[in-house]
Image: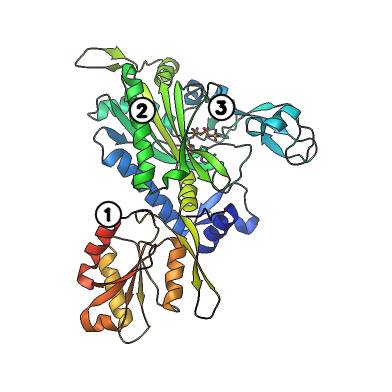
Amino acid sequence: MANDATMEKLVSLCKRRGFVFQSSEIYGGLSSAWDYGPLGVELKKNIQNVWWKEMTQTRDNIVGLDAAILMHPRVWEASGHVENFSDPLVDCKGCKNRFREDQLPEENRVSRRCPDCGGELTEARQFNLMFRTHMGPVADEGSQVYLRPETAQGIFVNFKNVLQSSRVKIPFGIAQTGKAFRNEIVTKNFIFRTCEFEQMEMQFFINPSEDTRWFNYWREQRWNYYLNKLGIRPDRLRWHQHGPDELAHYAKDAYDIEFLFPFGWSELEGIHNRTDFDLRRHGEYSGKPITYLDEETKEHYIPYVIETSSGLTRTVLMVLADAYEEQNLGKAEDGTSDLRTVLHLHPRLAPVTVGIFPLVKKDGLPEIAREIEASLREDWTTYYDQGGAIGRRYRRQDEIGTPYGITVDYETKENRTVTLRDRDTMEQKRVKIEDLAETLRRNIAEFHRQ
Ligand code: ATP
């Protein structure tokens, strides 16, 4: 299948159909902040639910957590963020554009000339990415807090709470999803890199002697998740191992899963061996050492952590880019080219699972269609549409990725059957109304990416 998605087309589709809007658009917009519209919020929630199910509900050794965004400021000293969480910032003296030095093309880094206008670049300054704010009415040093730049630290500082309150034993994991904030120097590419975003992270606590085995295990699990649970095409995914210069201050080994976005290969998720860095530091900074006692071997140790860290909002962009296709279906009846835009979203992710259409707005067909909709609503997201030509109604659903369409026609009145249309093959089959739920269930379970 051709790679039809460009960023312009995705941004335009997202706005037109209500997936993603520019934040505060009526005031001219706030750059790099985005709002999720009626379809976007469904897609985002579906991705989050699939991740949550995969990482907690279907495993008996991972539990969930929902920590606060605001945390004690000492957390960020212990974690190394106050000292290390910065990017090198350079400005162009000519056009005044701003760049991350480490992301400049090699030639510009060497020549110290702007990639946009050829002007001279300033020396790099380290710029801390954490957003600062104040808690309470007086904005002084003592009231300063940060908006969390990652969800992971909420997990580390609750390690003991979880250990003592749940009956977990090492190896076990804690998972959480939520907002994170980074004052990124360069935000571009729509929702790929934003100052406010959502993460889905899991920290897996292990005996240090087993780190290689668990690191490899989680790499494999996460790779398979993208293929099998989200239905991403394998040729659009690849691994990138961090070289010695790229490794974060806490990491012993790190691999990114990268996706081929319309603007090139970029990180989607990181799998990191964080060693005992975080638990050890929180033990030191809080004065309350964090150790684990293995009751069988009587071994006392600070656990190592294998982390899987992915972006929820970034996954939304990946899923849309991967699903987008423009098809030329030949000549329409009036002689013009028949084009359709379709999102091949996995049915688990699609904002609407099934569209329901009475062929005409009369003769009792809408009533039957409404009845069918009511019977399917408990289990799936439905959308009822009785406006316009049926072909156009199908296309409207194709464009937002609705995998199935049910049409109620005159034959329905005779024999209680409807047509069930498949978004990807566009095939239509007659199905008895009473078999619809079971047929949909089977189709979703057996879904294969076209
Ligand atoms: P980069 O080097 O590109 O700034 P990172 O390596 O610092 O990113 P991590 O700290 O590993 O990223 O964050 C884990 C995940 O969180 C990333 O893989 C990405 O999916 C997501 N993420 C990080 N920063 C942003 C952002 N500014 N906007 C959207 N998602 C983000």
Name which of mark 1 and mark 2 comes first in the sequence: 2
* Residue 193 visible, this angle: no
**Which residue does the numbered mark 2 point to in the structure image?**
216
Tell me which amino acid carries mark 1. Ala
The spot of residue 390 in percent (x, y) is: 41, 77
Residue 233, compared with residue 437, is above or below; it is above
Q: Secondary structure at mark 3?
A: loop
Identify the residue at the far bottom of this view: 363
Q: Secondary structure at mark 2?
A: helix
Q: Residues within 10 Å of mark 1 (few under 14, many from 20)?
A: few
* Residue 109 visible, this angle: yes
The spot of residue 121 in percent (x, y) is: 76, 32
**Which residue does the numbered mark 3 point to in the structure image?**
85
**Which residue does the numbered mark 1 point to in the structure image?**
445
Q: Quadrant of the C terminus?
A: bottom left
Label 3 CB-ligand 1 distance < 8 A: no
Name which of mark 2 and mark 3 comes first in the sequence: 3
